[in-house]
Amino acid sequence: MKAVSLDLDTEDLAQLYERVSADRQFKAGRRLIEELKVSVGESILDLGCGTGLLAEYIAGIVGTGGSVTGIDPLPLRIEIAQGRARPNLSFKTGNAYDLSGFAPATFDAVCLNAVFHWLPEKKEPLRQIYRVLKSGGRIGISTGAKGSPNPLHEIKQRVLSRESYKEYSAAAQTAVHRVSAEELSSLLIEAGFTIQALEERPSPQPQLAPEAAIRFSEASSFGNFLGHLPAKLRERAREDLKRELEQTDVRASRERLRLIAIAVKP
């Protein structure tokens, strides 16, 4: 099971993600927060907060009597997020596999927006989240559904299987680990949660030009999309991908689906 590399992010990719995530991840995150019923005065953990757009939005909901903590394993993105910090909003570098810096029963809710599919092993993060939630606390997850791949990733696998690239096997492997609704249900129940809502929903995506689609995938994967290739080959792969995308009607691909789950710690 391949884990993502945290060493391929760059300042350029972090700044690009800050700009492009507002049209996808942030909008999906706002819907998740509505369903999580975040309210004034609550203490919230935004796990995998990126550059802090969603955490800043949540801080506006909980108000000065509440608090929001955003953590992310990528220092360059946390550096950008720090610019949003205020008395009820803080950020630090960290990851879902080790929440030992937080006392048990610290948070009213934990959200993972566009994060869960990056976790290769999912049981330990759920155990960690269960520990830091108060009794009656909620977990909200919004993630791509298994069986609903990004068509660009399918094209990438086809391109990187060619002679020029195939010796760099790490570049062709997917680092995304999606689950089905049934698998997510089992994981949440095993961790001790009571499920309130869990469903697959259509996830309409804006149609991007080939160059923009590639750059978005590079930024949202913090360099894992093509970063395992040597720099010269990376540029050639981008051009090959653009040509393939120009010849492919991605609208004819299978409908993209998103998993939304809300669960409670009894």
Image (spheres, rainbow, N blue to C red):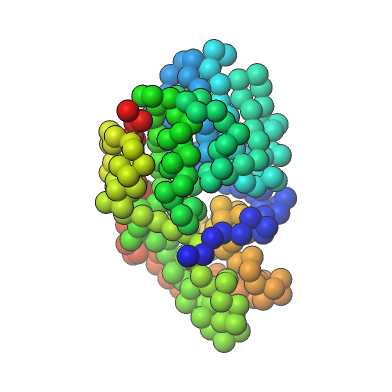
The quarter of the picture where residue 190 lies is: top left
- Residue at left 47%, top 65%? 1
Residue 43 visible here: yes
- Answer above or below: position of 121 versus 76: below
- Residue 56 position, x and y percent, is 57, 28
Residue 252 shown left or right of residue 89 in the figure = left
At 54% from the left edge and 60% from the top edge, which residue is drawn?
Answer: 3
Residue nearer the viewer, 100 or 242: 100
The answer to which of 98 and 222 lies nearer the viewer is: 98
Residue 92 rendering spot, x and y as whole percentages: 65, 36
Left or right side of 209 for 262: left
Q: Position of residue 185 (x, y in %)?
A: 29, 46
In the rendered structure, the answer to whether residue 199 lies left or right of residue 119 reads left
Q: Position of residue 244 (x, y in %)?
A: 49, 74
Left or right: where 106 falls relative to 141: right
- Which residue is nearer to you in this view: 72 or 123? 123
- Determine the residue located farthest toward the top in the rendered image: 65
Residue 260 image-quadrant placement: top left
Residue at image location 39% in from the left, 61% down from the top: 149
Examine the image and state in which quarter residue 81 appears: top right
Residue 57 seen in the current view:
no
Task: Tell me what residue is drawn at x 46 percent, y 37 percent.
Answer: 129
Q: Quadrant of the C terminus?
A: top left
Query: Which residue is situated farthest in the bottom direction here?
Result: 163
Task: Work out whether 217 lies above or below 85.
Answer: below
Q: How many numbered tags mark residues here?
A: 0
